[in-house]
Structure formats: structure tokens, C-alpha cells
């Protein structure tokens, strides 16, 4: 577990985090003393879809450390207030009582109440408290509710226990823990309250939702609470070992149902779904997920990257659709809803959608209902979700590229040209170890592999698609291969340059009706135009320590001499000259160090090797022999050669 934090004072951390909710949502305010985030008076109780005034205020909360739950769930259409404790600890009953009695609307004693007897009829408003099933939360929130009832406030409490990680036998009388599924209950209840429904109706639907949710989580490691000694946490919780994953871990570091070692994501998700859905598991078959409508929530416990969360969602949805489950959720929610600080894990929640039996909106409608809570992340509209049932359209037509390129009229002997091109590509492949070594010293080490991958892909392409003899058509086909196999900055530069070269060949050539030889002068003219095109997209110029230091000298020498060998030597000289040259562009600029004093620019050196092979100056076998002798000796040798006039 990581014990490094930007804010190490837990009290300061909680208060400043709560304060941030008022900065992000102007409709909420903060009672810092009681750690209550609440809707500003007069805000959020006028329904946007009807003329009915909101009758029910919704309050939730618990220990801090689960953000955005619950402070960022306060907003129009969701919570009316949240009461926060310290990290992983319940707020006090007095904090909660203050929230019920003094920080939300609809808390006036009922006109027909007598010393705590609730009244007000079927359409009465009031306050609904939604709390997760943890002993401290249930006791403190429950005590506050009873105090409010004694004062005549019409208030009810719903306890959510959705976790199946701990089964019936182990949980005993305590029951299931509340985890991420709680936010679905809050969203459903909050939307119903916003539509002016009574406390009785909102409480009924909240209970229905809570009774039809199952959740389970998995973590790769425990979390560290800011301000707490790591040694104390290590003694309190058995640290997960390398390669272990805990299934069913609670959101306060509580132990789960099992620890598995060496399992991949598919097997992990399979075990989690089995706990959620296996009707034969008497210890965990809490809900029969048999509805035609099922909602899936994949929740980030705080420390999983969005990239990995995407992969997790895909795996969960794929396995749900397969037998024996055959579940295709009508809504799929994924994001950070309820965390365990920076927990390196995720949870899966399934809501079995049932009839609300109140003659009004269903659970899906309530989940889709708009809200202004910054912590609720569900931007896809109801219309878009419903259209997917009918609209399965995709665009899968193959986009043409090289097939659309017309002949440029510049022709050559395809067999002779292919022989030289293959030699150049093989020289690049043979140079990979040196290029990789240089890039490891001044970059991120991937330049050599990238060039080799591109060269190998072009060679493979040429095996099945030999050159035809028209410069533009042949190059256009090669460009496609380059774009598909070379990524990063170098891939983009080569892609721009080669695409521009295709266009330049048409400019230099006369078209199919006016064929002429693609000689050195024609290539030089086309290459010159391509360099001008490339300069529009990158400020790189000779002297900046980039591949341009080899490219420009090659083009200039070819234009002046019409000799490919002299041009290749010029490229080699330009690449060698980058040794000791301080970079002005590229990753080397901010990597720093003195590596640039010892080696040439990797991209320039790789391109120079291609030109040397293309010109027949250097064979791949020769390059391999130099590598066998030792790259450092080989480098000194080519440096001396490059210094020749």
C-alpha cells in the first residue's frame, strides 16, 4: 500500500474536501463545524418537470474516504444533504440530528403529530435517511432519526446492504455490508423526491431498490489512511502479497471472502459474477436477478486508471451476456462513484429492476432523471439508451486509400527499384540494436523497435505486393503500411512526409498520359516539395537533433548532385553530426542528461542507415558484422567515416 499523500492531516483533508463541493456546485453550502454539505435554502426543491413542490428531503452520509460518495452526491435530483465523519468513521448522532432538524427542508413537525407520533397522511412529506449497513452508521444515524421523530419530524430510514462478499453464515445478524450499490438507491430515491412524491412513496421505492441490489468488490492491495502510521495498518490488516487479489474486500479495508493468487481478469470477473448470480450458493443467493431489465454499475474504488476500467467493463459485460447468465443490461454505468480512498480495485453492482407499484415512474426512469450532483456520472440520455434497441447501425465500409491514388506518370524498373528498397529496409532492421541503445540513453528506448517494426512490415508487404513501376501508386501502398505499424512521433513524421511525397510525385510527374522516367532529378524535386510540406507541421530543422538532420542533407545532396550514393553519405554525415548536439525538440529535451554528448540522434541514425542501404553503400550483413564486433567500436568507425569530405 502507498502511504504517501499530498495532505497528511486527516482533519484538514476532510474539511477541505467538503469545502470543494461548494466550489464545484454553487447550489450547495457547507456547515464546517458539523461537516454537513446541504442544498442552499430555496434551491433544488422546485421540480423541473411538474408544478409540485418537493416534499421529501434525502439525507445520507458516513465516514469520509469514499468520495465522491456522499458529499458530491448532494445536488438537485439527488441528496438534499450529506453528513460526513472522519476517514472511515461514522459521524456522530448529533451531527446527523443537526442535518435532519436544521439543514434541510420538510423537517417541520407534522401538524397531526403528537409527541413523536408521525402523521400527515398519504401525501405527507418529510425526511428520508439512507445509510449503509455498518454498525456505527446504523446506530448514529438511527439515534438521530429517533430524536427527530421524538421532536415530531416525519422521518424514515432505509439501510442498504448490497455486498455479497460476506455470506449469510459469516455476516450473522449484522447482515450484508453497504457498498457501491448504495448510490443507485440514493439516485432512485432522490429523483422520486424531486418529482414531488410523498415520504411513504419515496421510502417504499428506496427499500425496493435496496432489496434488489447485489454488489461485490475486488482489490489488489489495502489502502493507507492519511495520518495513520503505516506500521499500525500493516499490523491491523494482513498485507496482500504480490500477485494476490482479495475478492469481497470491504470499503474500509475489511477482509473479503477469499484471496486468489495468479488469476487473470477473466477468471476474477467470473468468480465475482458467480458470487452475485449463483442461485445454488445458499450462503450468497440474496437476490434472484431475473428481471428483463438489469442495471450494471462497475465502480472504481479509487486507484484504477480509466484505461483499465474500460477493459474491466468490457470483460464484465461480455461474461454477463454469455451463458448461463444471458444478461444484457439496459443501463451500464462505469466510473468513480464510491471509493476506498485510492483503493486499487473495483466493484460490480447489479440492480434487478422491479415494479415500483406507485403508479408513477419506474426505476429506470428515475435513474435517467436529471440531477445536478457532481458525483453522479451518467451523461448518456434516456433517448440514446432506448434507441440502441432499434438502432444497431454501424459504419464498417472499408475506407479506400491507395486504391484511389491515380498514376503519376513517373515510372521505373520495378524489379531493380524493389531490390534497392529491400536493401535499405534490411539495413534499418540490422541497425536496430544500435538505434535502440542510443535511444535508451537519450529517449525512451523505442525508436529502434519502431523503425524495425515498420521496415519488417514493408518487407512483408512487398513479398505479396511487388512494386508495379508507378512511383505514386507504389508509394501510396507503402504509406498505408507505415501508418498502420509505426506509431509515436516518428510514425507521424514519416506518415506526413510520405503522404506529401505521394502528392509531390503527381506534381513532378505528368500523369498517366505523359509518362517519364522517375530519375534522381525527379525524385529530388518531389522530395524537396515534401520537405516543405513537412515543415508546416513541425518546427524541426537541421541542427535540432532530429531525423531531419539526416533527411534534409540527403535531399539537398540529391538535388545538387543527382547521385544517390553522395546523398546517402550526406545523410550519414548529418546523422553523425548530431553527436554532441543538444536537442531542441523531442523527448530528449526534457529527459536531460549527458547522453546526447555520447551518441547521435537515434532517429537520424536509423534514417541514415536506410539511405546507405538504399544506395548500396552498406549491406545488412556488413552492419551485422559491425554489431558483432561491438557497437561502441562500430560507432567510432562510422563517425570517422562520416567526417570524410
Image (cartoon, rainbow, N blue to C red):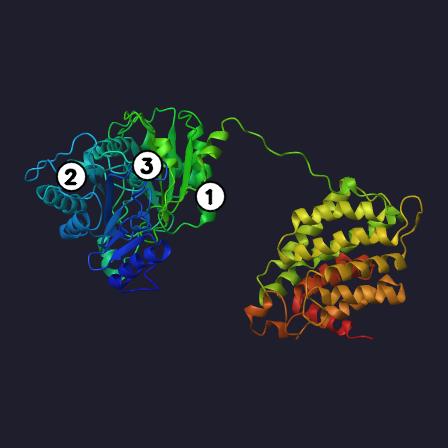
Circle 2 SS class: loop
Residue 230, located in which quarter of the rendered image? bottom left
Q: Quadrant of the C terminus?
A: bottom right
Q: How many marks?
A: 3
**Badge 2 local density, few (<14 within 10 Å), some, or many (20+)?**
many
Local secondary structure at mark 3: loop
* Label 1 packing within 10 angstroms: few (<14), some (14-19), many (20+): few
Residue 1 at least partly seen: no
State the residue position of label 1.
Answer: 310
The mark nearer the N terminus, 3 or 1, is: 3
Residue 394, horizontal then vertical, whole percent: 59, 33
Front-most of residues 233 and 305: 305
| Quarter occupied by residue 282 | top left
Residue drawn at (80%, 43%) of the image: 405
Q: Label 2 near label 3: C-beta < 8 Å?
A: no
Horizontal and vertical percent position of residue 639: 73, 72
Q: Which residue was labeled with disc 2?
A: 154
Q: Earlier in the sequence, mark 3 or mark 2?
A: 3
* Contact between labelled residues 1 and 2, with CB atoms less than 8 Å apart: no
Q: Is label 2 or label 1 in front?
A: 2
Q: Which residue is mark 3?
A: 51
Q: CA distance from mark 2 to mark 1?
A: 43 Å
Residue at 66 percent of width and 62 percent of height: 435
Task: Name which residue lies at 63% across and 34% down.
Answer: 396
Amino acid at each position: 500500500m502507498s502511504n504517501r499523500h499530498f495532505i497528511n492531516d486527516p482533519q484538514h483533508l476532510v474539511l477541505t474536501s467538503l469545502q470543494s463541493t461548494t466550489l464545484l456546485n454553487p447550489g450547495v453550502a457547507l456547515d464546517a463545524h458539523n461537516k454537513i454539505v446541504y442544498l442552499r435554502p430555496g434551491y433544488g426543491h422546485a421540480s423541473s418537470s411538474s408544478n409540485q413542490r418537493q416534499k421529501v428531503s434525502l439525507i445520507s452520509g458516513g465516514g469520509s474516504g469514499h468520495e465522491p460518495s456522499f458529499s458530491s452526491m448532494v445536488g438537485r435530483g439527488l441528496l438534499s444533504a450529506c453528513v460526513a465523519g472522519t476517514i472511515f468513521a461514522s459521524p456522530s448522532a448529533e451531527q446527523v440530528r443537526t442535518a435532519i432538524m436544521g439543514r434541510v427542508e420538510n423537517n417541520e413537525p407534522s401538524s397531526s403529530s403528537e409527541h413523536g407520533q408521525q402523521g400527515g397522511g398519504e401525501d405527507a412529506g418529510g425526511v428520508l435517511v439512507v445509510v449503509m449497513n455498518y454498525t456505527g452508521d446504523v446506530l448514529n444515524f438511527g439515534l438521530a432519526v429517533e430524536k427527530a421523530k421524538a421532536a415530531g419530524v416525519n422521518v424514515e430510514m432505509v439501510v442498504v446492504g448490497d455486498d455479497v462478499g460476506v455470506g449469510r453464515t459469516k455476516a450473522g445478524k449484522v447482515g450484508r455490508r453497504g457498498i457501491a450499490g448504495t448510490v443507485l438507491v440514493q439516485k432512485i430515491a432522490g429523483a422520486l423526491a424531486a418529482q414531488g412524491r410523498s415520504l411513504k412513496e419515496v421510502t417504499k421505492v428506496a427499500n425496493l431498490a435496496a432489496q434488489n441490489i447485489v454488489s461485490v468488490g475486488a482489490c489488489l492491495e489495502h489502502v493507507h489512511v492519511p495520518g495513520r502510521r503505516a506500521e499500525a495498518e500493516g499490523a491491523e490488516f494482513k498485507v496482500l502479497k504480490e500477485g494476490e487479489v482479495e475478492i469481497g474486500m470491504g470499503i474500509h479495508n475489511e477482509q473479503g471472502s477469499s484471496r486468489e493468487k495468479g488469476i487473470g481478469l477473466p477468471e476474477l470477473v467470473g468468480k465475482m459474477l458467480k458470487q452475485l448470480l449463483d442461485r445454488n450458493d445458499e450462503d450468497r443467493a440474496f437476490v434472484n436477478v431475473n428481471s428483463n431489465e438489469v442495471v450494471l454499475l462497475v465502480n472504481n474504488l479509487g486507484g484504477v486508471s480509466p484505461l483499465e476500467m474500460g477493459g474491466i467493463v468490457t470483460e464484465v459485460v461480455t461474461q454477463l451476456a454469455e451463458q448461463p447468465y444471458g444478461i444484457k443490461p439496459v443501463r451500464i454505468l462505469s466510473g468513480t462513484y464510491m471509493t476506498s480512498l485510492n483503493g486499487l480495485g473495483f466493484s460490480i453492482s447489479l440492480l434487478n429492476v422491479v415494479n415500483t407499484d406507485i403508479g408513477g415512474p419506474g426505476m429506470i426512469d428515475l435513474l435517467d432523471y436529471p440531477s445536478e450532483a457532481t458525483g453522479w456520472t451518467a451523461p448518456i440520455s434516456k433517448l440514446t439508451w432506448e434507441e440502441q434497441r432499434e438502432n444497431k447501425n454501424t459504419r464498417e465500409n472499408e475506407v479506400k486509400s491507395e486504391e484511389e491514388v491515380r498514376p503519376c506518370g513517373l515510372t521505373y524498373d520495378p524489379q531493380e527499384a524493389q531490390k534497392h528498397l529491400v536493401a535499405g529496409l534490411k539495413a534499418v532492421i540490422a541497425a536496430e540494436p544500435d538505434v535502440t541503445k542510443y535511444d535508451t540513453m537519450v529517449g525512451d528506448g523505442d525508436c529502434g523497435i519502431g523503425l524495425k517494426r515498420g521496415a519488417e512490415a514493408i518487407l512483408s508487404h512487398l513479398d505479396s505486393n511487388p512494386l508495379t513501376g508507378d512511383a505514386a501508386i507504389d508509394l501510396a501502398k507503402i504509406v498505408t503500411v507505415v501508418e498502420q505499424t509505426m506509431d509515436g512521433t516518428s510514425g507521424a513524421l514519416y506518415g506526413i512526409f510520405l503522404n506529401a511525397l505521394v502528392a509531390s510525385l503527381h506534381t513532378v510527374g505528368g500523369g498517366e498520359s505523359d509518362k517519364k522516367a522517375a530519375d534522381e532529378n525527379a525524385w529530388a524535386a518531389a522530395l524537396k516539395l515534401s520537405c516543405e510540406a513537412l515543415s508546416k507541421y513541425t518546427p524541426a530543422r537541421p541542427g535540432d537533433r532530429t531525423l531531419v538532420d539526416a533527411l534534409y542533407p540527403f535531399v539537398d545532396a540529391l538535388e545538387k548532385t543527382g547521385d544517390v550514393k553522395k546523398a546517402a553519405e550526406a545523410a550519414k554525415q548529418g546523422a553523425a553530426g548530431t553527436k554532441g548536439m543538444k536537442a531542441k525538440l523531442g523527448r530528449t529535451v526534457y529527459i536531460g542528461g549527458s547522453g546526447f554528448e555520447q551518441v547521435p540522434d537515434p532517429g537520424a541514425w536509423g534514417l541514415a542507415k536506410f539511405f546507405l542501404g538504399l544506395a548500396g553503400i552498406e549491406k545488412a550483413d556488413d552492419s551485422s558484422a559491425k554489431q558483432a564486433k561491438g557497437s561502441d567500436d562500430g560507432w567510432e568507425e562510422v563517425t570517422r567515416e562520416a567526417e570524410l569530405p
